[in-house]
Image (tube, helix red, strand yellow):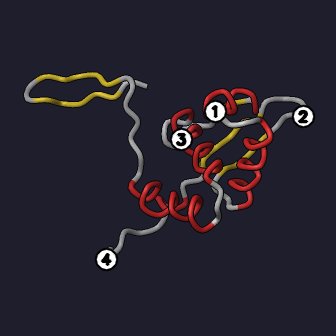
Amino acid sequence: MARTAIVGDSQVNHPDRVTLDAYVLDSLMPDLVGHDRRPSAMLVFLYLWRRTRGGARPTVVSLRMIADGTGLAKRSVQTALDHLRRRDLIGVRRPNATAASSLTLRCHWRDRPAAGAS
C-alpha cells in the first residue's frame, strides 16, 4: 500500500502512510464516539479503512484478525461490526456461517455533491 509523494523533483515512497477523508475525522468520529458512544466502532472502521485502502476494495477478515489489529475483544468487535452495519457504513458478505467475512466500506459521503457545487 505504498503511496508516492513528489518532493521537489524526486518521488518518495511512504509505505506506512494512510490517507483519510476529512469526513472521517470531522463528522464520522464525533458521531460514532460522541453521539453513538461507540468508540470501538470507530477503531474497527479505521482498521477496515486501512485494510480496504480507504474503501477502494473489499477485504476478507475474521473477528480474530480485527481483534488482534485493534486491541479489542472479539465480542467488542462483533458489537462494533453490528453497529457499523446498522449505520450502513459497511457491507458484510459471508459465504457460510463459519467463514471469514468479506467487508466493504460504504463511503456515502463521497456520493454527495460538494457544498456550493451546482
Residue 117 or 105: which is nearer the viewer?
A: 105
Is the residue marked by circle 1 packed among few (<14), some (14-19), or many (20+) residues within 10 Å?
some
Gap between marks 3 and 2 measured at Cα:
24 Å
The residue under label 3 is 49
Residue 12: x and y in percent read: 22, 22
Image height of 117 relative to 107, above or below: below
Question: Which SS class for mark 2?
Answer: loop
The residue under label 1 is 71
The residue under label 2 is 96
Amino acid at dot 3: Trp
**Residue 117 falls in image quadrant:** bottom left
Q: Quadrant of the N terminus?
A: top left
**Residue 96 falls in image quadrant:** top right
Residue 31: x and y in percent read: 55, 65
Whichever of callouts 1 and 4 sits on the residue coming sooner in the sequence is 1
Judge from the rendering whether residue 18 lies leftward or rightward of residue 30; answer left or right.
left
Amino acid at dot 4: Gly
